[in-house]
Amino acid sequence: MNTLIAKLRETAERDNATDLRAAFAADPERFSKFSVSFEDLLMDFSKTAINDEILDLLVKLADEAGVAEKRAAMFAGEKINITEDRAVLHTALRNRANTPVMVDGADVMPDVNEVLAAMGDFAEGIRTGAIRGATGKPFTDVVNIGIGGSDLGPAMTTLALAPFHDGPRLHYVSNVDGAHIADTLKGLDPATTLIIVASKTFTTIETMTNAQTARKFIASALGEEAVAHHFCAVSTALDKVADFGIDQSRVFGFWDWVGGRYSIWSAIGLPLMIAIGEKNFGKFLDGAYAIDNHFREAPVRENLPFLLGLVGFYQRVILDYPSRAVIPYDQRMSRFAAYLQQLDMESNGKSVTIESEAVTTPTGPIVWGEPGTNGQHAFFQLLHQGTNIIPIEFMIAANGFESDLRHQHQLLMANCLAQSEALMKGRSLDEAKAQLLDKGMDAGKAEKIAPHRVFSGNRPSITFVYDLLTPYALGRLIALYEHRVFVEGVLFGINSFDQWGVELGKELATGLLPVVSGKESAEGHDSSTKGLVAALLEAAK
Ligand code: F6P
């Protein structure tokens, strides 16, 4: 590994591989060499600092790291999440061929199918009005209470698939800040509101606290008996759900081999299914399944998730870019970056290898983003002219749903392509000066102003193009990113499937609750924490 990494660094420097402008000028075939398609999904990575030799070395590196073997182990249900002794089988949740998937000697597929069928019955019951609230009224509003993986997946996908949303209105509450649930419940009628409590562990303080607030909202308006009619739950901890008082027939289970950030395909997807219906949810699973097969079967050089992982690793470790931005040119994908933040950063934000040693290369990058064209009028200045290079991943559909607004979609496409072109090409000092002189500026002033109008160029981006953002296409896109995170995780040599880094803050918050409630002294905390507690208590009314 280390020899190959050193060779990659050497090659990148020697070839001045980051000179994209020169690479395009030298090779008219660059796009066809460095773009791949799966079905209608095209991934163009020709505007990244890759060349044949670098790609060869990256493929060798993947061989040496055992990406293919580890991929096989994941799909086969081996316990690759070694720190939690768990299999990693979100792929079983969308295993549409229904072939057996064994964990501890038992096929998980019968349980997967049973829950999917129960979700389907329940979702259709809510959508048709066959399942009603305590007063006999059909449900018009569904509130999903969950956080992290129990919120971001369904919230992001519900928004992304708005054109398919023909069920009741969906609302998502995640933050323990009372403002979130208060603002959400305001204006809702308890008699027509269904609450889904979604928590893998059913211990997460934010979710449990919000669930109790929602319970009061229902019980105070309709009586304690109404809770059974207005609540359902999604969890792996069925005993804890029973303690909360939610009827077993209203509980949709999943399993410890489904990571929270990989759980949208499980019962955590129930709100999405209620929004778009069982059939469309099935198509969403189909899309992910198609990528699973592609990831398992396609040769590396035609394999989208594999290549995306290789390029991501190259940009992070060899070129040392600390962050990457994901910019969908699709307003409905406005939560996609937030979703990917958990998927990527909770998976690959690690400093210890799978062998429990300190890592010797950087690991997961900072992932962030916003939809275009909005971002262009906010942070793109830094992407074009700032001192850090931030690789970008653009995505754009060839078609919008608003066929009467085709001219707006054309503007959207033009902007997306213009940004990647501008980032790559840039504008030299001579070009900037010539442009100013052409406009009639005098030479002295042009000399002063031109440097401000220079774009260094050579700023990398990947662009995804697809026909239309359907449930199938979205399923495909999410699964693609899941497998990219997997590939990068193997190359970093880490376990992508635990998340111990979230624990310490949780523990300290538990200890600080009695302190900020004024019941215990802040003694024993550091002086900053003590000072902040004092300021909060003094200002509290
Ligand atoms: O705190 C991190 C985390 O454990 C995530 O991994 C998870 O998605 C989220 O909290 C919510 O957990 P749960 O579904 O158990 O409430």
Image (spheres, helix red, strand yellow):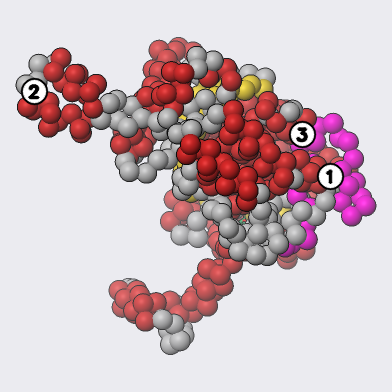
Q: Give the CA distance from mark 1 to mark 3.
A: 11 Å
Q: Classify residue 3 as left or right of residue 71.
A: left
Q: Which mark is residue 91?
A: none
Magenta residues, start to end: 83-107
Residue on which disc 3 sits: 296
Q: CA distance from mark 2 to mark 1?
A: 69 Å
Q: Residues within 10 Å of mark 3 (few under 14, many from 20)?
A: some
Q: State the mark number for residue 76.
A: 1
- Where residue 270 sits: x, y (%)? 68, 42
Q: Quadrant of residue 384?
A: top left
Q: Which residue is mark 2?
A: 443
Residue at left offset 43%, top offset 76%: 516
Q: Check disc 3 and give the amino acid type.
A: Arg
Q: Which residue is more in the foreground, 406 or 168?
A: 406
The x and y percentages for residue 493 are 66, 53
At label 1, the amino acid type is: Ala
Q: Quadrant of ligand 1?
A: bottom right
Is residue 433 left or right of 178 when viewed as pictured?
Answer: left
- In the image, residue 94 lies at what x, y percent? 76, 36
* Image mark count: 3
Q: Is residue 196 left or right of residue 435?
A: right
Whether residue 531 is in magenta: the answer is no
Residue ID at (55%, 29%) = 51
**Tag 1, which secondary structure?**
loop
Task: Inspect the image, locate mark 2, and give the three-letter code of the amino acid beneath it.
Answer: Ala
Q: Which badge, 2 or 1, is on the more N-terminal residue?
A: 1
